[in-house]
């Protein structure tokens, strides 16, 4: 039976670490933030100092981005709107060697409500 998108997200969440909004807010000074939402979503509101690299191009652009190139050991928080795309993106980042990437639980929605 084929997997659904939510099956893939659930599977990714088994392989990554999620960080709460409260923990993320306390650690903003020493982390890089990738927002994997689409540009229009990002333009509507974002976490301070977040860099927008849409989920669909993340694997192709991360190693060439001036902030992230050569930063495989950097602490990275990945966010999206609700936590699904960021979970998938975080799993991909781990595969690309960004070992300290974590996903923001609840995404930007939780951030803006918190």
Image: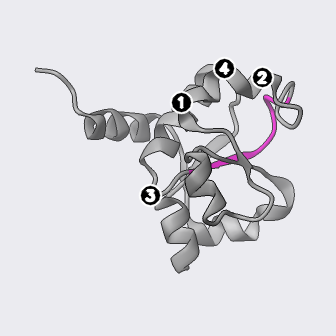
Question: Which segment is the magenta one?
Answer: 71-79
- Where disc 3 sits, the SS reads loop
Residue at the image position 58 percent from the left and 53 percent from the top: 40
Q: Residues within 10 Å of mark 3 (few under 14, many from 20)?
A: some
Left/right placement of residue 96 relative to residue 8 reads right
Question: Residue 56 shows which numbered tag?
Answer: 1
Q: Are marks 3 and 2 in contact (CB under 8 Å)?
A: no
- Mark 3–mark 1 distance (CA, rounded to whole Å): 16 Å
Q: Quadrant of the N terminus?
A: top left
The label nearer to you, 2 versus 4, is 4
Q: Position of residue 72 (x, y in %)?
A: 79, 28
Q: Is 24 positioned to the left or the right of 15 in the image?
A: right
Which residue is identified by label 2?
A: 63
Q: Nearer the viewer, residue 109 or 1?
A: 109
Tell whether position 39 is magenta. no
Residue shown at 46% from the left, 52% from the top = 83
Q: Is residue 74 visible?
A: yes
Q: Nearer the viewer, mark 1 or mark 2?
A: 1
Give above or below for 46 relative to 113. above
Where residue 2 appears, x then y in whole percent?
16, 21
Earlier in the chain: of badge 3 and badge 1, it is 1
Give the structural element (helix, strand or loop) at label 2: helix
State whether residue 34 is above or below residue 72. Answer: below
């Amino acid at each position: 039976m084929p997997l659904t998108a939510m099956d893939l997200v659930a599977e990714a969440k088994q392989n990554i670490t999620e960080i709460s909004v409260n923990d993320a807010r306390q650690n903003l000074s020493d982390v890089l933030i990738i927002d994997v939402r689409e540009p229009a979503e990002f333009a509507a509101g974002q976490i301070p100092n977040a860099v927008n690299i849409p989920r669909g191009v993340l694997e192709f652009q991360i190693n060439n981005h001036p902030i992230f190139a050569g930063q495989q050991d950097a602490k990275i928080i990945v966010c999206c709107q609700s936590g699904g795309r960021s979970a998938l993106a975080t799993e991909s980042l781990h595969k690309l060697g960004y070992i300290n990437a974590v996903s923001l639980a609840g995404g930007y929605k939780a951030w803006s409500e918190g």
